Image (cartoon, coloured by chain):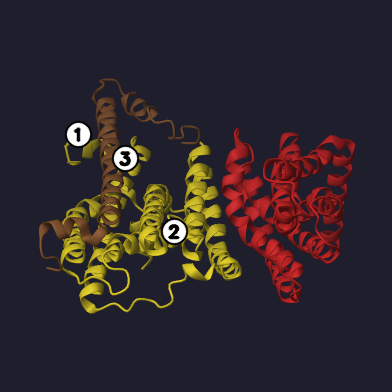
């Protein structure tokens, strides 16, 4: 048990360190996030009447797309330099190591998105209470995106044209999180109680935490077996 | 019969275009998939038969080499 | 029991059994489906609220029904692929996925056209239509992944994992789409009561559903046989079968 935890910690720290050495990979999803949000006032309307009710949804969609964009990096580097095969030979169960990598991915993409959110939320005229709830839903929701995304990233590992395929496979699975994320923000804007929805999103997170690493580990084994 | 005349059957009280376009698309697309499956099957049979007909012993493996999805690495 | 299971996994055994089953599936299926559709189109009484547009139901409901159950069948086959490594299960998944995708599209299309006279608009973001749209994307993802991976074994198992993840998600997706729908639904689009169906209406519907099931079985057998021929092209039994002309 103790060795499992220390192995997870080692994998996480390693992922974080290698990413910090390439800050561009960290910045890209954030810049993409800002870019997508910026397109809505430019493309639809800069009026408060449009942006305020739509803001929660816009930020959620943008966050979802940024996470999707960064998924390719989740296993790619380790796959290219052979680290992944080393990981599979470790005595620790593979799903724990996949979980550690998913958590590291969230710390490197999801969390910065959440930190950036209040800034962009002000730009789309969201109000104080909505901003708080939006950050909270993203805080609970983005780990789910990373965890489910790990399955897709593992399945498309080693494929040449993984990008569109990954989106096609993963976006349908993201829909429940998106619906409850934006729904909760809308409910908060109308002054309704949101504890129930937040609890439900927490349930999604618990479900993803327990099931997704198993599926992703199985997918990794499949992708590596034909290498 | 729920309709008095053939014309009533075709117009369906104003809903004819909707009903008939649905049925048309349903049958057309289903038949396209069925026909495509049959053509593909015939193509596979012909390719295999041609492979077997070749005199050398390598003929069989050449037959399946025509299909990109057949994996030849681990047999 | 195990012997039967083992036999079921044998492509040769399947090929023979399918050849014997297919004529029955085809002709009984055609008869049932066409009879159900003609009965529904021409002889069933018009619906009280919707008039004649409801006659779309005789293809819409069978397509929607089958589209959903095909995905469940694929999930069962996915378990068999992962647990017992049975090749035939993957043959089933690969052969059937395009049929499922087409049925989902047809259910969506007929639903949208039906919506025009009923709701006054082609597309409503109604819970059921939206769930079907997502189901179509799930099918598309499984087909695309299967095509993208060259290696047969990896492709089989990767698609199996994806289909299983999808089937776990379907209830969650449906639940959340329904919740989302209650949040946004404009009340004018609501069908206030489920139309009560007289037996002259639902008996032909039942016939159409059964008939389409059998036709699906026929097409699935046909496509699976083709896939088996492709994969087993180098084996002796396929060579003998083709040279003896046993494939007509």
What's the residue at 71%, 62% (across, down)? A181
Q: Counting residues from the N terminus, which is met first, the one under dot 1 or under dot 2?
A: 2
Q: Are marks 1 and 2 on the same chain?
A: yes
Residues at circles 1 and 3 in contact by the CB criterion of under 8 Å: no
Which lettered chain is shown in brown? B
Asked if residue C246 lies left or right of residue B64, the reply is: left
Mark 1 vs mark 3: tell me if same chain. Answer: yes
Residue plotted at (82% across, 55% down): A8
Parent chain of label 1: C
What separation in Å lies between label 1 and label 2 (alpha carbons)?
36 Å
Which secondary structure, mark 3?
Answer: helix
Tell me the residue that label 3 is attached to: C229
Q: Which residue is mark 2?
A: C71
Q: As drawn, is C100 to the left or to the right of A124?
A: left
Say above or below: C128 vs C158: below
User: Mark 1 against mark 3, which lies toward the viewer?
Assistant: 3
Which callout, 2 or 3, points to the residue nearer the camera? Answer: 2
The spot of residue C109 in percent (x, y) is: 38, 53
The numbered dot on residue C243 is 1
Residue in the foreground of this view, choosing between A39 and A67 = A39
Quarter of the C terminus of chain C within the rendering? top left
Give the crowd class for mark 3: few <14, some 14-19, many >=20 residues within 10 Å: many
Q: Is C12 placed above or below C63 here? A: above
Callout 2: chain: C
Q: Which chain is red?
A: A
Location of residue C105 in the rendering, given as x and y in whole percent from the top left corner: 40, 51
Is residue A185 in view? yes
Residue at position x 64%, y 41% from top? A157
Q: Colour of chain C?
A: yellow
């Amino acid at each position: 048990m103790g060795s499992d935890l220390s192995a997870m910690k080692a994998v996480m720290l390693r992922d974080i360190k290698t990413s910090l050495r390439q800050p561009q990979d960290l910045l890209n999803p954030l810049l993409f996030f800002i870019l997508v949000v910026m397109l809505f006032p430019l493309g639809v309307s800069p009026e408060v009447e449009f942006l305020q009710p739509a803001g929660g949804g816009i930020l959620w969609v943008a966050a979802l797309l940024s996470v999707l964009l960064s998924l390719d990096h989740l296993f790619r580097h380790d796959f290219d330099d052979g680290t992944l095969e080393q990981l599979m030979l470790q005595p620790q169960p593979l799903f724990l190591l996949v979980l550690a990598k998913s958590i590291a991915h969230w710390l490197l993409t999801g969390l910065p998105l959440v930190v950036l959110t209040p800034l962009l939320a002000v730009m789309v005229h969201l109000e104080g209470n909505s901003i708080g709830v939006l950050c909270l839903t993203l805080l609970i929701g983005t780990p789910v995106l990373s965890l489910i995304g790990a399955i897709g990233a593992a399945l498309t590992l080693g494929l040449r044209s993984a990008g569109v395929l990954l989106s096609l496979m993963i976006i349908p699975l993201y829909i429940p999180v998106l619906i409850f994320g934006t729904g909760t923000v809308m409910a908060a804007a109308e002054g309704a109680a949101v504890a129930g929805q937040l609890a439900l999103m927490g349930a999604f997170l618990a479900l993803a935490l327990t099931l997704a690493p198993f599926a992703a580990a199985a997918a990794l084994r499949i992708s590596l077996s034909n290498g | 019969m729920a309709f008095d005349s053939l014309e009533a059957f075709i117009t369906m009280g104003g809903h004819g275009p909707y009903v008939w376009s649905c049925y048309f698309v349903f049958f057309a697309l289903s038949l396209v998939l069925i026909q495509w499956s049959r053509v593909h099957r015939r193509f596979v049979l012909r390719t295999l038969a041609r492979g077997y007909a070749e005199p050398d012993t390598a003929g069989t493996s050449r037959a399946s080499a025509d299909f990109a999805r057949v994996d030849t690495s681990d047999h | 029991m195990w012997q039967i299971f083992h036999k079921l996994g044998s492509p040769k055994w399947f090929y023979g059994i399918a050849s014997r089953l297919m004529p029955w599936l085809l002709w009984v299926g055609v008869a049932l489906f066409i009879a159900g559709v003609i009965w529904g189109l021409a002889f069933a009484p018009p619906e009280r609220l919707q008039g004649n547009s409801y006659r779309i139901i005789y293809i819409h409901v069978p397509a929607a029904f089958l589209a959903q159950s095909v995905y469940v069948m694929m999930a069962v086959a996915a378990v068999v692929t992962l647990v017992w490594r049975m090749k035939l299960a993957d043959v089933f998944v690969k052969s059937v996925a395009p049929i499922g995708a087409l049925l989902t599209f047809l259910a969506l299309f007929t639903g949208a056209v039906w919506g025009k006279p009923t709701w006054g608009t082609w597309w409503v973001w109604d819970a059921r239509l939206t769930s079907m749209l997502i189901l179509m994307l799930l099918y598309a993802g499984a087909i695309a992944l299967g095509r993208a991976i060259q290696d047969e074994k990896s492709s089989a198992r990767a698609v199996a994992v994806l289909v299983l993840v999808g089937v776990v998600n379907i209830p969650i997706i449906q639940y959340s789409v329904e919740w989302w729908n209650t949040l946004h639904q404009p009340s004018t689009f609501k069908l206030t009561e489920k139309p009560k169906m007289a037996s002259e209406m639902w008996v032909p519907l039942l016939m159409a559903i059964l008939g389409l099931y059998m036709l699906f079985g026929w097409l699935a057998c046909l496509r699976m046989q083709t896939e088996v021929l492709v994969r087993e092209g180098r084996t002796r039994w396929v060579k003998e079968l083709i040279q003896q002309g046993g494939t007509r």
